[in-house]
Image: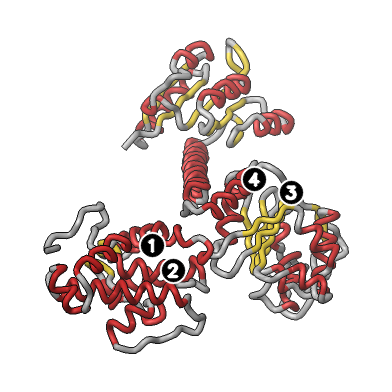
Amino acid sequence: MKSTRVLILDDESTMRTALFRTLDRKGYSVVTSQSIEEAKSYCSVNSGSDKIFDLAIVDVNLPDGDGLEFMTYLKSIYPAIQVIVLTGFATIESAVLATQKGAYHFLTKPFSIEELMSVSEKALDHKNLQKENLQLRQELTSKYGFANIIGESEGLKNCLSLVERVADSDATILVTGESGTGKELIAKAIHYNSPRAKGPFIAINCGAIPSELLESELFGHVKGAFTGAVANRAGRFELADEGTLFLDEIGDLDPSLQVKILRALQEKSFEPVGSTKTVSVNVRVITATNVDLDRAVAEGKFREDLYYRLNVIPIQIPALRERKTDVPLLLNFFLEKFNKNRAKKITGFSQESLTSLMNYSWPGNIRELENLVERLTILKGQGEVIPADLPAKYKSAAACFAETGIIDIPDQGLDFNTAVDQFENALILKALEKTGWNKNQASILLRLNRTTLVEKMKKKGLGINNEGVELSGNA
């Protein structure tokens, strides 16, 4: 583990010695200097990680210059360094100036070694916290990058192309799509790829909170504003200052709140519940809904002026049934995720189970698919997922018939031609499996000419594995 490196810059030899001994006993790697010129010789813009200073203790008045100017130089080389400034002639103005230039703390001589050590430890803790926050920010940016939104379908590519173009702007965005399509994921991708990425991302589901409480959640309240308001509380608009506010299910908003949100968007200000004081904020607003807002406006359920204020840039996320080619990619993505998280060993999906899942309509979209993969990972544990592992509603009509002899039509209906094709596939595969993939014997079981069976297999791609190699046993 890298030792904490400390630079001491003071022209008083007794002070340097005392500080060196104290910090050295604490296990720090300490370098001392009596002048700015000497201190600069220990610093380098090309320093390796083992040469970077974590903390500097700098006297203001030095024989060859100003300690505060040297602090500015230090921070240009080591942006994360924490600096404690020492002086024998303290004034309020000098303390304020030191803080403005980036000093962590300002100590007046004489001071106790215990006080200095306490401040030094706090400064290093602050540095570590800043590093952790930066790492977390980088992880979030990576997690919500465009490359991590899974899919290759044309509909999704068009959606992401628009998202990428609008991320840099501050325009209000309305994300629409069915439940489970990933509207919040899109909102986070916009935020973490925008100039506001260093600011907060605050989300609230407008449909999940009773309307009588939602105003306080959005705008905050002051103490005594209502029963139970025992202290002042900031709302989501204020918490999102300098960042992004994501209002999910905006279509469920009560009409009385629609007026207040419209004003907050127009004026960039609001009054907390029970207060006459106006709070100004700098917030980008992204909203989302699975409600047809055009119809809601026509029916008088949603304010037209608010709709146009929200719908500056509309982004429509396609339903999963409209991007079927993305289903295998999503299945594999979530399979890897849950295999890792739950220490399972599912190897993948058989061709028959994959065909059934690709032909399923996915009314719950990606959320439903993720939940299914998690369930299969837990229950199956290892091996390949086959049709028998799938819950009944995910199986094709052909698969259900092959297992039970009964054709079940799901509530959402099915495509007749697809079902017939799947049924024919299932019969051919069943016959081939029963005869050890002997085409002559399979054709007899199915009462087909062998050439007819072979032509059907070629047309349907049956008897070929995932690498395009013909399976053995095809006599």
| Mark linked to residue 89 | none
SS for callout 3: loop
- Image quadrant containing the N terminus: top left
Identify the residue under disc 4.
167
Is residue 346 placed above or below 142 in the rendered structure? below
**From mark 1 to mark 2, how far is it between C-alphas?**
7 Å
| Screen quadrant of the C terminus | bottom left
In this rendered view, identify the residue nearer to me: 246 or 125: 246
Element under disc 4: loop
Q: Quick check: marks 4 and 1 in contact, CB under 8 Å?
A: no
Task: Report the disc number at residue 171.
Answer: 3
Real-space Cα separation, disc 4 to disc 3, in angstroms: 9 Å
Q: Are marks 1 and 2 in contact (CB under 8 Å)?
A: yes
Q: Which residue is mark 2?
A: 369
Depicted 175 relative to depicted 83: above or below = below
Q: Local crowd at mark 3 within 10 Å, few (<14), some, or many (≥20)?
A: some
Answer with left or right where residue 380 lies relative to residue 334: left
C-alpha distance separating marks 3 and 2: 32 Å
Q: Counting residues from the N terminus, which is met first, the one under dot 4 or under dot 1?
A: 4
**Which amino acid lies under the numbered mark 3 shown in the image of this protein?**
Ala
Which of the two discs, 1 and 3, labels the residue nearer the N terminus?
3
Mark 2 vs 4, N-terminal side: 4
Q: CA distance from mark 1 to mark 3?
A: 34 Å
**Could you tell me residue 269's position as x and y percent?**
82, 56
Residue 331 numbered tag? 1
**Can residue 138 be seen at all in this image of the molecule?**
yes
Residue type pointed to by label 4: Ala
Residues at marks 2 and 4, CA–CA distance in whole angstroms: 28 Å
| Callout 1 secondary element | helix
Residue located 75% across and 49% down the image: 282
